[in-house]
Amino acid sequence: MSFNIRYSNNHDGINGWKFRKQWIADFVDFQDTDIVGFQEVMDDMYPELQSLMPGYSSIHMPSDTGKPNGEYEAVSIFYKKENLKLLDSGTFWLSETPEKPSKGWDAIYNRICTWGKFQHSNSGKTFYLFNTHLSHVGENARRNASQVILDKIKNIAKGQPVVLCGDFNTKPDSPTYNYITSALIDSRKISKKVYAPNYTGTPFEWPVKDNNIIDYIFVNDKLEVAKFAAYAEQRLHTKISDHLPLLVNLKIK
């Protein structure tokens, strides 16, 4: 699963974090998800997710480790303890200096990619998950960040099964999307079954726009995609987030 869960904003009213956090945890639990890449996890949200998801362990690194709590997001990975074993993990920054906290190109915030290498408990097979959130303002930053990510995937995963998920803030007709899909595959495009609208962004304060796909789960050719779904979760006037959660059913070849 990939899910931008919207940062804890005190101005969100009935869509505020305190009204959505249990809903998000219940949704993940009901889907029986083995692994989730969350985006926009602030420092105040992380311990609450840990408490609400006791069956999961996690990887968490804020995008600027030197700043006061809550100011910078993490792209946290939660994985089911009984099904997956963490073998290795790391975080790099989407900038010219990826090994240290930094801001790249025309982005206005630090952006990161957090990854883990996992082993499935029953099969013993291993795979990598890379989770990210690209700049919402700079196409140059998004394009260059995607190059950093693909270079890191090549050097870290070395051809093993890979999933890259996140909020990419880029549409399917963009240079960034075209660059990523020159190396990886959009799981929505190759899934045997698809249950999803033609958008993933669902803003709280204005109408949803069609043809607004900005969140993705990409895979390499070592994985088969049986199902892809994007769920438009809403209860009365409250949304689960300002992005749809994406789910895939994957099989390692």
Image (tube, rainbow, N blue to C red):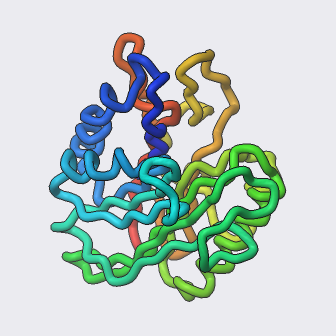
Query: In the rendered image of this protein, does residue 48 appear above or below residue 76?
Result: above
Q: Residue at x 61, y 79 (%)?
A: 99
**Residue 170's x, y, as percent?**
71, 46
Of 240 and 220, nearer the camera is 240
What residue is at 54 percent from the left and 61 percent from the top?
63
Front position in the image: 28 or 89: 89
To which quarter of the image does residue 116 belong? bottom left
Of 239 and 219, the residue lying toward us:
239
Residue 67 left/right relative to 250: right
> Which of the image's four quarters has the C terminus?
bottom left
Depth order, front residue of 200/50: 50
Give the side of residue 226 with respect to residue 142, left or right: left
Residue 44 placement (x, y as % from top left): 35, 46
Q: Can residue 94 be seen by looking at this rendering? A: yes
Is residue 202 toward the left or the right of residue 55 in the image?
right
User: In x, y percent, where is residue 159?
Assistant: 56, 85
Percent position (x, y) of residue 143? 78, 60
Q: Is residue 228 visible?
A: no
